[in-house]
Image (cartoon, rainbow, N blue to C red):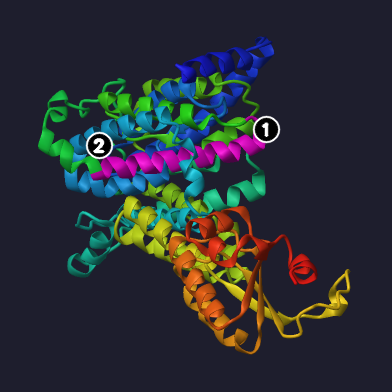
């Protein structure tokens, strides 16, 4: 109910003062995004193992629904390269009906996540992990397009299996297909540098490649029939939703789809939010993504997420409201009905060329360079492991492994305990006191005292052997766990048994609470607990 009320409030605010000029801005921005989205929708549809038509349908249905319900006006959703990468193995293993069912399940997961306000979970995934799985997906996309790019045929369910199959099947490129793919790659790389971005380079490259194919009749595979209907023949069958065993088998793929949709959409929203100054309602965005993915399989579409490329184009083109996303979807719908005969002649090698460039650009090169230049060993390790797990296993495994490694490294880092010692120096005190102990030792402890570092406490007893007074300065100890409390208590008991006077100084609240519960406070006594070492030295004797 709160989500609905906030959505209504935000919608009123979004369209306050909306006029003809705003409508024109939204319309032009929507058509600009259409020009960018069409070649990508076709490429991602084919790249996922489905069809070009599935990609178009996804862009249309998801574009309409998610734009209307989304967490911000600028989010543009549709098929993406990252989603296409994980769909290849799902299509190979479970066929398209399996993909449709997994997409519905993923939609339900996303809706539940939004209703439970889990939109902030993305912040718990470390940056190197996100960068690693993005690069892993980029590799999967590039390797998955070798067949179409070179006009060859591989076998296998996974990308690696297909790659290895060339050793048995042979690799004899169709040079006409390779030429078309290479032409598209060069056009996409060179055209923007020479002529700017008046027309999307991917759209221009596909138009030129298709014209060349129509004029010269190259011996290459093409997209094939593009149906002029919103309801594809191959779409979700209700019977599949009643097959409990199949539903159970598809829970893992559904979780992968949902996790990826969550990560991509929320990262896209965070990036676009910085560009526009308008924050994303992350929970409403998850609900919108869930609704879109719940509905799109009934039309024959594949999973959708918010796409940073299309979203950034919308923002830069002057989008004012969520009507931009709706106009972009209607533009794709019109193009599908009008240009279906021409789209059917697009060479698959041309779409493969588009995906090759997309996969290269997906990599977060600035972040990778930052990690390498700064020699951040832990971050580089997380990046490489996550990337390899994404390529070899799947997205969910990669994220889990990456986060676990991140937590382990973070635990090691945070559990580092630094202990330094200092003999009492009267010249450093503001209040010169003649009764200062002549054989006192100040022990400075910095870091949490936890199970991973309790062995460091053993050195304190050895260091304190020659002293009768030991002052623990613990301003740098934010907390203690039960193991740390127990071992610190043993240390205090040992020092007291040796006849030493113990003083606790500058103890933080959380650490003090653990000391009270562990009996350490009672062992030392209230008279030996001070706000600072200086106070203990001046007034403790």
Image quarter where the C terminus lies is bottom right
Cα separation between marks 2 and 1: 35 Å
Query: Camera-side residue: 339 or 322?
Result: 322
Secondary structure at numbered mark 1: loop
Residue 40 is situated, as x and y percent measured from the top left of the image, at 44, 39
**Residue at mark 1:** 277
Task: Please tell me the numbered disc located at residue 102.
Answer: 2
Residue 475 in magenta stretch: no
Q: Mark number for residue 109?
A: none
Residue 126 vertical placement versus 260 (above, below): below
- For image coordinates 60% across by 22% down, the residue present is 28
| Image vertical order of residue 462 relative to residue 208, above or below | below
Dot 2 or dot 1: first in sequence order is 2
Residue 499 visible within the image: yes
x then y, percent, for residue 468: 66, 83
Report crowding for label 1: few under 14, some 14 to 19, many 20 or more residues within 10 A (C-alpha): few
Q: What element carries label 2?
A: helix
**Number of callouts:** 2
Which of the two residues, 180 or 53, is positioned nearer the viewer here?
A: 53
- On the rendered structure, is 331 left or right of 447? left
State which region is magenta: 252-278
Q: Position of residue 415 (x, y in %)?
A: 52, 67
């Amino acid at each position: 109910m709160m989500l609905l009320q906030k959505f209504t409030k935000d919608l009123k605010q979004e369209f306050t003062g909306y006029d003809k000029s705003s409508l024109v801005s939204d319309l032009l921005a929507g058509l600009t995004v259409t020009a960018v989205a069409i070649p990508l929708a076709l490429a991602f549809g084919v790249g996922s193992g489905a069809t070009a038509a599935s990609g178009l349908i996804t862009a249309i249905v998801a574009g309409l629904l998610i734009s209307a319900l989304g967490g911000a006006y600028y989010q543009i959703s549709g098929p993406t390269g990252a989603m296409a990468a994980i769909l290849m193995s799902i299509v190979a293993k479970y066929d398209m009906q399996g993909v449709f069912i997994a997409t519905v399940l993923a939609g339900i997961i996303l809706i539940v996540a939004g209703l439970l306000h889990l939109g902030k979970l993305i912040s718990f995934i470390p940056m190197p992990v996100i960068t690693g799985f993005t690069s892993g997906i980029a590799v999967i996309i590039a390797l998955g397009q070798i067949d179409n790019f070179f006009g060859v045929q591989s076998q296998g369910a996974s990308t690696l299996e297909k790659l290895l199959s060339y050793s048995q099947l042979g690799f004899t490129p169709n040079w006409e297909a390779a030429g078309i793919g290479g032409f598209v790659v060069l056009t996409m790389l060179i055209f923007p540098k020479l002529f700017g971005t008046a027309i999307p380079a991917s759209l221009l490259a596909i138009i030129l490649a298709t014209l060349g194919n129509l004029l010269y009749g190259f011996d290459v595979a093409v997209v094939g029939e593009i149906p002029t209907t919103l309801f594809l023949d191959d779409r979700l069958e209700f019977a599949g939703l009643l097959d409990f065993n199949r539903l159970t088998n598809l829970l893992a793929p559904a979780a992968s789809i949902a996790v990826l949709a969550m990560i991509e959409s929320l990262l896209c929203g965070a990036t676009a939010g910085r560009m526009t100054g308008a924050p994303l309602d992350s929970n409403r965005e998850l609900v919108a993504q869930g609704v879109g993915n719940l509905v799109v399989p009934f039309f024959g579409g594949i999973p959708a997420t918010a796409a940073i490329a299309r979203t950034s184009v919308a923002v830069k083109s002057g989008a004012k409201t969520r009507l931009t996303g709706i106009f972009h979807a209607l533009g794709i719908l019109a193009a599908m009905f009008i240009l279906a005969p021409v789209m059917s002649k697009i060479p698959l090698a041309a779409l493969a060329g588009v995906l090759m460039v997309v996969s290269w650009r997906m990599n977060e090169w600035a972040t990778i360079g930052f990690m390498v230049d700064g020699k951040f060993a832990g971050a580089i390790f997380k990046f490489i492991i996550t990337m390899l797990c994404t390529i070899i296993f799947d997205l969910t495994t990669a994220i889990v492994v990456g986060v676990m490694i991140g937590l382990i490294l973070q635990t090691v880092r945070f559990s580092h305990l630094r202990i330094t010692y200092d003999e009492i120096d009267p010249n450093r005190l503001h209040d010169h006191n003649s009764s200062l102990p002549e054989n006192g030792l100040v022990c400075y402890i910095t870091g949490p005292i936890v199970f991973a570092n309790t062995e460091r406490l053993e050195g304190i007893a050895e260091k304190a052997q020659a002293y009768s007074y030991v002052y623990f300065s613990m301003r740098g100890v934010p907390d203690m766990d039960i193991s740390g409390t127990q071992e610190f208590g043993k240390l205090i008991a040992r020092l007291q048994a040796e006849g030493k006077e113990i003083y606790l100084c500058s103890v933080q609240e959380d650490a003090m609470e653990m000391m009270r519960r562990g009996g350490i406070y009672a062992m030392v006594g209230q008279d030996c607990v001070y706000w600072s070492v200086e106070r203990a030295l001046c007034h403790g004797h």
